[in-house]
Image (cartoon, rainbow, N blue to C red):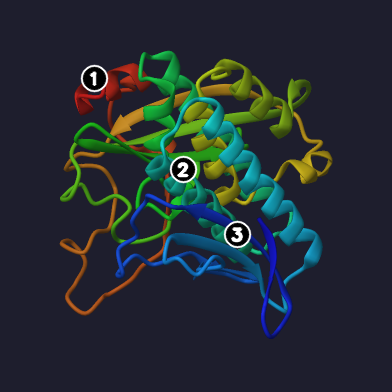
């Protein structure tokens, strides 16, 4: 239902889940411009969740979010999702919008655009290697601020992307990113792109991905959520004119002689670090995406 909250007259979309349960400790999404609140418009104690625009929130952006969330629920109903699943779809999609708004709602920076293309390139390779589409996309945790970009099987895979023709500068964002003490084995995939007019731009790469997973409702839902969380929205598609082609990907396992800084190797007292390495100078064989997935137990 559409509604307004009293007394501030804030616009809201109310969704009822009459047989679903939400634990008191469950944290509901809240971001810049919106909030999700429990509501009881019928006074019967059954669960309703209200997606409500805050006074400082953009009406245009809230409308886009409301339409997208309701559309995601419609799609889930069409494939027979039960009520508990529908509630997860609702909270998951709103959470993705929360990430999108937290990251600024602006067009991706050129660096972030390249990074997203690299992650999508690896995601497609993971699917092509035999990992089911929905599972592959669910493993893509980079947009959700995961320590590494993909968590598959027992291991993880971090993606770095460059346009550099000479050398492969890769920024390492934390002491945890190349630490394999939590998930093993850990791999770094270096995706090199070349900017070329005969290539594909980001929206075209995304469209190819959507075609590849068409008909898999769960995969389509997860991809939409991950793209939002990564900071991409379709209405910005004309802002990404640059076209690229793949110029090779090298996948190397992070082992004892891999150049890295971790909590266990830096001097006591160092709590955080951001540093750069040259992936072209990293020792180790290129095991490829399939080789990494086999070693992680994902295929």
Pointers 1 and 3 in contact (C-beta within 8 Å): no
* Dot 1 alpha-carbon crowd within 10 angstroms: few under 14, some 14 to 19, many 20 or more: few
Tell me: 186 left or right of 168. left
In this rendering, does residue 11 appear at all? yes
Secondary structure beneath dot 3 equals strand
At a point 59% along the width and 23% down the height, the residue shown is 209
Q: Quadrant of the N terminus?
A: bottom right
- Label number found at residue 88: none
Q: In which quarter of the image is the C terminus?
A: top left
Q: How far apart are marks 3 and 2 (CA)?
A: 13 Å
Q: Where is residue 234 in the image (x, y as percent from the top left)?
A: 74, 41
Query: Going from the N terminus, do you reach mark 1 or mark 2 first?
Result: 2
Secondary structure, mark 1, is helix
Look at the numbered discs 3 and 2 and tell me whether their residues touch, using CB distance below 8 Å.
no
Residue labelled with disc 2: 86
Q: Is residue 108 visible?
A: no
Drawn side of residue 55 relative to residue 79, left or right: right
Q: Distance between the residues labelled 1 and 2?
A: 34 Å
Mark 1 or 3 closer to N-term? 3
Horizontal arrangement in the rendering, residue 151 relative to residue 182 (left or right)? right
Asked if residue 164 is positioned above or below residue 182 in the image, the reply reads above
Q: Which of 166 and 114 is in front in this view?
A: 114
- Residue 264 is situated, as x and y percent measured from the top left of the image, at 15, 62
Query: How far apart in space, not on screen, are marks 1 and 3 (Cα)?
Result: 45 Å
Q: Which of marks 3 and 2 is nearer the N terminus?
A: 3
Question: How far across and down, in percent of the image, does residue 155 sit?
Answer: 23, 36
Q: Which of 242 and 194 is in front in this view?
A: 242
Q: Return the residue at label 1.
A: 294
Q: Which residue is drawn at 44% across and 39% down?
A: 159
- The residue that mark 3 highlights is 14
């Amino acid at each position: 239902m559409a509604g307004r909250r009293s007394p501030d007259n804030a616009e809201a979309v109310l969704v009822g889940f009459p047989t679903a349960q939400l634990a008191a400790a469950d944290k509901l999404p809240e971001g810049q411009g919106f909030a999700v609140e429990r509501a009881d418009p019928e006074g019967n104690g059954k669960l309703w969740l209200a997606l409500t625009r805050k006074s400082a929130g953009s009406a245009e952006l809230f409308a886009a979010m409301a339409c997208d969330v309701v559309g995601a629920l419609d799609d889930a109903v069409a494939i027979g999702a039960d009520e508990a699943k529908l509630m997860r779809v609702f909270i998951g999609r709103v959470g993705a919008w929360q990430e999108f708004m937290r990251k600024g709602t602006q067009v991706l920076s050129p660096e972030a655009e390249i990074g997203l293309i690299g992650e999508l390139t690896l995601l497609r390779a993971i699917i092509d290697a035999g990992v089911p589409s929905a599972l592959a996309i669910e493993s893509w945790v980079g947009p959700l601020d995961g320590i590494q970009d993909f968590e598959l099987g027992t291991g993880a895979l971090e993606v770095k992307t460059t346009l550099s023709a000479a050398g492969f500068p890769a920024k390492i964002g934390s002491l945890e990113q190349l630490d394999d003490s939590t998930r093993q084995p850990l791999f770094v995939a270096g995706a090199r792109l070349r900017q070329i007019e005969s290539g594909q731009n980001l929206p075209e790469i995304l469209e190819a991905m959507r075609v590849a997973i068409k008909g898999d409702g769960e995969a389509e839902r997860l991809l939409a959520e991950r793209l939002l969380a990564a900071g991409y929205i379709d209405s910005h598609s004309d802002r990404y004119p640059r076209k690229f082609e793949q110029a090779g990907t090298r996948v190397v396992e992070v082992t004892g002689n891999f150049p890295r800084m971790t909590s266990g190797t830096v001097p006591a007292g160092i709590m955080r670090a951001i540093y750069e390495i040259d992936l072209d100078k990293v020792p180790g064989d290129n095991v490829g995406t399939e080789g990494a997935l086999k070693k992680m137990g994902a295929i």
